[in-house]
Amino acid sequence: MSAPPRPGRLSPGDVLRVGAAGLRSRRLRVFLSALGIAIGIAAMIAVVGISSSSQAELDRQLDELGTNLLTVEAGRTQDDKPTQLPNEAIGMIARIGSVEAVSAVGRLPDVHAYRNEHVHPAQTGSLTVYAGRLDLPETVGLSPVSGRWLSLPSADFPTAVLGWTAAQRLGVGDTAAQPQIVVGSHRFTVVGVLRPVPLAEDLDRAVFVGWSAAVAYLGFDGHPTTVYTRTAEDAVVQVRKTLPRTVKPGAPSEVLVSRPSDALAAKSITENTFGGLLLGLGAVALLVGGIGVTNTMVISVLERRSEIGLRRALGATRGQILLQFLVESLLLSALGGLGGILIGTVVTGGYAATQDWPAVVPLWATAGGFAATLLIGAVAGLYPAVRAARLTPTEALAGI
């Protein structure tokens, strides 16, 4: 007797064509199932991309502004009473070998700024009035968006510079016309408006007047309330430990030293934690999309029993039937994955553009997202594929 004929073998191209033919016959259902996968992948890509873009912007800011800025403020005594920094604090800090620049501001807590004399005294706008030294911009990194900073001899006269937020609340935009505001009970001419200050956001809500003008017009006592110090990058930790004893040798515990860049790092950690939550939601959406793929494939098996029976009767093996439906599920998931990657990338780029951030989508995120879709496609299609492969030709053709 001659051996029974061997079943025909399908090439990889034939397998892809057979799987794609199944998708083309149910386009709306395929679209909806792929959309579920796409939403999950898009959410994951967007979360990772936006978080990475935010981190890139933070790194850019730190590179531009530096991490070597330290602030020195007065703390409280052991009796929990407020204390002051000595007038000599600026000069004492400047004598530390690793200090590159030092400047200060003096807060005037009982002085408020208004657009004009007709504003009610209670409507302070949460603005703070500071006496500012002339070298403050070089130390902190201030730069005017319009006008200029205080300079000699104008700092001796009633002139003011506004932080970014303060200018918005006082309705001052263009300093070319030399607008005037009321500080305390005196009119001050605005000579400049500053750009936002990422490392010292409290300065955005500030109204700056000259040190000597604050003494002459506003009753300033001359004590600095915050001293800003720039140090060598490799000496930040050592200088941070030295500052309290330098400012107040007899009571170093009454001096508070902070590093503004630490606040930016903490903000990044908070954003990453929130991003992790959104990433989890994206994973849930992806799981729901996988369930949709499974549902589509199960229905496909039920609808195509006659096709399966006919193929089995013509010699198709169980392995070929299983492979056909498994490839169909993988193609369906791959379509959703590619769409999700595209949507997530566009969302990341659009959001980064609105925030003026560099758009960053890590390669591992796109590769991992696509790999996740293939894995979900394989898992989602395995049960329907096995179920199709187990159908005998008689069962399938009989519609059982």
Image (cartoon, helix red, strand yellow):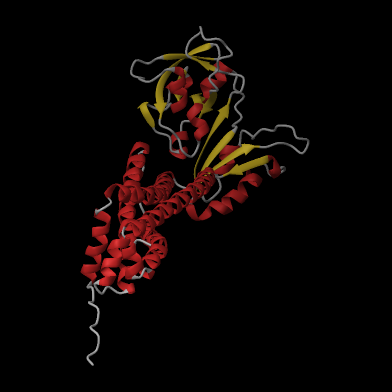
- On the image, the x and y values in percent for residue 387 come to 40, 65
Residue 258 percent across, percent down from the top left: 58, 43
Q: Out of 179 and 295, give the one closest to the viewer.
A: 295
| Residue at 29% over, 62% down | 306
Rendering quarter of residue 371: bottom left
Q: Is residue 73 above or below residue 49?
A: above
Identity of the residue furthest to the bottom in this view: 1
Q: Looking at the picture, does residue 321 appear above or below residue 370?
A: below
Residue 376 vs 118, above or below: the answer is below
The residue sitting at 62% across, 24% down in the picture is: 221
Q: Residue at x 64, y 41 (%)?
A: 256
> Which of the 4 image quarters holds residue 326?
bottom left
**Number of marks in the rendered image:** 0
Give the camera-side residue of 208 and 363.
363
Residue closer to the observer: 360 or 308 = 308
Q: Is residue 98 visible?
A: yes
Q: Residue at x 32, y 46 (%)?
A: 343
Q: What quarter of the picture does the C terminus occupy?
A: bottom left
Mark yes or no: residue 359 visible.
no
User: Position of 322 compared to 246: left or right?
Assistant: left
Work out which quarter of the rendered image holds the N terminus and state it: bottom left
Tell me where residue 14 appears, x and y as whole percent.
21, 68
Q: Quadrant of residue 141?
A: top left
As drawn, which residue projects farthest toward the front?
398
Measured along the vertical axis of the image, is residue 162 above or below residue 11? above
> Closest to the observer: 379 or 208?
379
Report the residue that reaches farthest toward the top: 118
Q: Is 124 left or right of 148, judged from the image as shown? A: right
